[in-house]
Image (spheres, grey):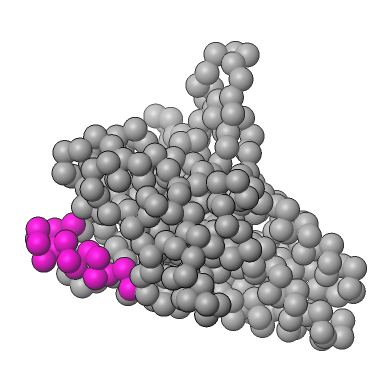
Amino acid sequence: MRVNGQARRTIVPAITADAVTVIDQRWLPHRLDVQTLRDLPEVIVAIRDMWVRGAPLIGVTAAYGLALQMRHDASDSSLASAAQALVAARPTAVNLNWAVRRLQAALDGLAPGLRASAAWRIAGEMADEDAAVNEAIGRHGLPLLQAVAARRGRVDVLTHCNAGWLATVDWGTAIAPIYQAQAAGIEVHVWVDETRPRNQGASLTAWELGQQGVAHTVISDNAGGHLMQHGQVDLVIVGCDRVSARGDVCNKIGTYLKALAAHDNGVPFYAAMPLSTLDLSLQDGLREIPIEERSAREQTHITGRDARGELVEVQLVPDGSGAANPAFDVTPARLVSGLITERGIVPANEAALRGVAGQG
Ligand code: MRU
């Protein structure tokens, strides 16, 4: 997608195969800060501290992290411990585990001397694949918006968190159908949930939609239900961090409340899911998906730009108040109208999901 009119991806490998550059998303929308990651420890910090975030992007970044480690030490023990450390960096999004295990399996059968170049090549293939998969998700989601536009002349979509270009290598998942609709000349407007506590909606989704020229309005996380009651939302489209075999959708905290409000108001609720986000080893998403608990400071403090243009962090709560910060929640399959995948839209049930994954 575009930044200041220039096409770019979120992660760019060095021609010299010894580093990747990423956008440090902690400073958006106020500062576009591009950082170079040169080794495994730097990649782990970037994933854990959310310089890069979003399920597909952390998967691809981790693959490059493993490739960088293979340049340093390609032994079996180095491969195993690097894979373990990467997977532990963020526990909820299954794409991280999927990407690391896929690369690890490819390298396991190779002599150590061959691993570094093979890992770099495969990580690059995974990045290209992610961009292609998301483009396909956009194409498959487009008819949902076309149908509304045919009826109403325009489409209002509500989204939560950032499942756009910044959460992937390119295109995004939930936002990809919106970019396709824009390209098809449909009048589309996006209600952007701010997404407390880290504000991925207000900071990241709003920024990237602005960069692509898509009309959008940032709303508080509490506003969505009200807008749905008043007929101002045609569709909800969110991303996913892990989807269980029976179709329970784990995504950024607050997604479940949007699904409840959508259900109560007859608003279709779709989740966009690359098949790398499907975890067929789990049934009951509510009980079996590990939910990342992040630092309470994300809840008690907030960072923004002051009147002088300086980035400042301020405290929001009284001294001594406790805070909890579960980072994801699970929306039961019964509230999900469908999953938009790279192979088409499928209902949220086990038979359909196993079928689309080729494991029926
Ligand atoms: O904690 P984050 O910012 O990594 O969470 C991101 C989300 O919840 C996204 O909506 C999800 O990863 C889907 S990304 C295409």
* Quarter-of-image position of residue 14: bottom right
Left or right: residue 250 compared with residue 35: left
* Depicted 14 relative to depicted 92: above or below: below
Decide whether the magenta segment is chiefly helix, strand or loop.
Answer: helix
Q: Residue at x 58, y 63 (%)?
A: 279
Q: Position of residue 304 (x, y in %)?
A: 46, 34
The reply to whether residue 192 is in sight is: yes
Q: Position of residue 253 (x, y in %)?
A: 49, 41
Q: How many marks?
A: 0
Q: Position of residue 325 (x, y in %)?
A: 58, 33
* Depicted 67 relative to depicted 270: above or below: below
Q: Residue at x 50, y 21 (%)?
A: 316
The part of the chain drawn in magenta is 140-156
Q: Residue at x 27, y 59 (%)?
A: 213
Q: Residue at x 57, y 37 (%)?
A: 326
Q: Residue furthest top?
A: 319
Q: Is residue 71 magenta?
A: no
For the residue pair 310 and 45, the one nearer the viewer reads as 45
Q: Is residue 145 magenta?
A: yes
Left or right: residue 317 compared with residue 296: left
* Depicted 240 relative to depicted 328: above or below: below
* Quarter-of-image position of residue 194: top left
The reply to whether residue 55 is in sight is: no
Q: Position of residue 269 (x, y in %)?
A: 32, 53
* Quarter-of-image position of residue 268: bottom left
* Depicted 241 relative to depicted 298: above or below: below
For the residue pair 75 and 109, the one nearer the viewer reads as 109
Left or right: residue 39 compared with residue 187: right
Q: Which image quadrant: the N terminus? A: bottom left
